[in-house]
Amino acid sequence: MLFLRPSLVLQGALEMLNVLDLTLPTLTFPDVSLGMKKTPWDLRPLLFKGGAAAQANRLAGLIDAGALGPPVVERLELVQKIHEELQAKLAGGGSKQTVKTEIGDIRVFFRWADASDHPLNLDAIETTYLCWSDYLLHRVRIVKDINEVSAYRLARTVGAILDKVLERAKPILLRTRLTYPPRRKRVLGLQADKQSLSETFEFGHALLDIVDALTLDAIWGPLPLRIRLRTGQEIEKWSGLIAPEKLRCANPQNRSQRSHAKVSKRKRIDYENDRTLRTRSPLVNLRLEAELLLFIGQTGMNFSQALQLKVRQYSYKSTIDGYEVRDYKHRRQGEVLFEIHSDYKEVFDRYLTWRKSIFPRDTEGLLFPFIRRCGPSEDMPKKFFWQLSALCQKLGLSFIPPSRLRNTRVNWLLRRSRDTDLTSQQAQHSKETLVRIYEEPSLQIAMVEVARFWQSNDPALPSPAPGICDGVPVPIIGINPEAAQPDCIRPTGCLWCEHHRDIDSQDYVWSMASMRHLKILALKGFRAPVEGKTDEPPSLVEMAIERLTAKLRWFRQSNELRRGWVVEALARIDEAVYHPYWHYLIVAVEGD
């Protein structure tokens, strides 16, 4: 039997006493406003082994009841530093939604460390993180329950926080084997490109029709509210009620069902007569959804930024194609909040008037104050635009989410202006982010750019012979010394020019056949003026005939379509139907 020294026993007892009597620090985020039923953000569960795996709404009770056991003291410094970094990000204007996501990812990391018995302290956190990254890679390659992008983003989020906690000069993510897969941009054809814009325009028209239908009189009027679209379609909205024909007791058969139907009918009448935000909030939220998407489509603002905009006293300054919207300040101009097109100004002013009537007391609240059961809050709900999404599905329309709406706007601006600096400024992004993330390949733009490239580097000009050139005579490599030299004057010289280009058309084949016929006539009528020089002039004509014959032979042997062109051209020559370019010369040589 082993006996411990009294000093060691006393030291262990004191350590246990310190753990039990430890006063946990405040690890909440008091500056984050949440709804009445929302659980406040708290990092205290990370101090307990198994705390990261518990439900967030039960953690406070579990900690107070001691169900999680004593806190792990060695984690305290690490968790405090993580809390300081997240709090500093919020204080510096960081997105609350981003911090919320980071807290969730940190909890995933701690949950894995608790399950696999890895230490969580400042000295060992780097090794634990690298082991976790290998675990994520194992899930990607072997288990295959997550994809490579999800694993990379999860490790990147946690790694970025640890870099600040550990004050690292280089990202810890670079020490892992996780990599972001290259983004393959899908190339849209002409039809798909037009279809994408067409769907966006149809969706925009539907949003305007919904906004026009949800007036004050319609919202506070009798139910159902009917929304008529310009396409002739119509939708009934019961503002949270079930349509009468879909009720279970629409046709009661016995006394119990009749009694239930009577009570249900009385409650239904009371609900319809209660014309307040309690009963008409679904209709108000539907218009807010439509107005928010119209606003994002016009301004190009990020969804989370638009959602947190406050109502201001707006002033407008006219620009070339729209207005700069500023926060009005007495005797001085405020900062530019956003820019809108001139056609949207009337829609935006009409919305502000409608909002003021719906929320008369909320004069300095959110610009788009969605009504929530758990009370107003600035954090984004899990299900957004669910009413519009369901309505579009019922109408057979494609629902365009804010990200795709903004992406379509950016690409439309880029294609219209072809100016990355201007487009990146409008989209509030750097030029590198615009090209790497937002720009989508377009077949139509590629065709235009290729045509412009060849027009500037290899311009097509009419040549004396059939075909086109750039007006710069350059002999081909290996030209026969006796062949006609290109000079952009004689048609025969074009046949040996480096810049001469054939044309893939029936008219070009007909013109070559006519030129060859003219050369044959010239060869037949040739008479040498001086003896001893009878070979040189005929050789020039013969080489031209051979060159033209070789071109016609290539067209004839390439495919059936071009073969038909050659057969048709030779038939026309036999019938004395010559190409208009050569007709008068041939007729003059023939003497007709």
Image: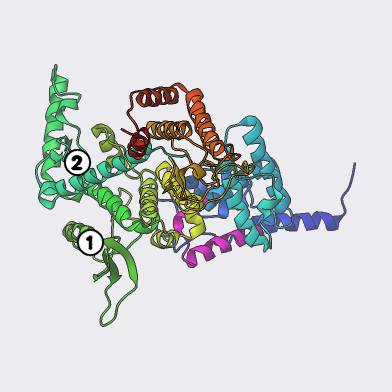
Is the residue marked by circle 2 packed among few (<14), some (14-19), or many (20+) residues within 10 Å? Answer: many
Disc 1 on helix, strand or loop? helix
Colouring method of the image: rainbow
Residue placed most toward the observer, 125 or 45: 125
Q: Residue furthest top?
A: 253
Dot 2 amino acid type: Ser
Residue under numbered circle 1: 342
Answer above or below: position of 253 versus 131: above
Would residue 182 be counted in the magenta stretch? Answer: no
Q: Residue 211: x percent and y percent?
A: 19, 49
Q: Residue 194: x percent and y percent?
A: 33, 40
Would residue 98 be counted in the magenta stretch? Answer: yes
Is the residue marked by circle 1 packed among few (<14), some (14-19), or many (20+) residues within 10 Å? Answer: some
Which region is colored magenta?
Answer: 78-101
Is any atom of residue 279 visible in this view? no
Q: Residue at x 64, y 57 (%)?
A: 162
Task: Give residue 239's mark.
Answer: 2
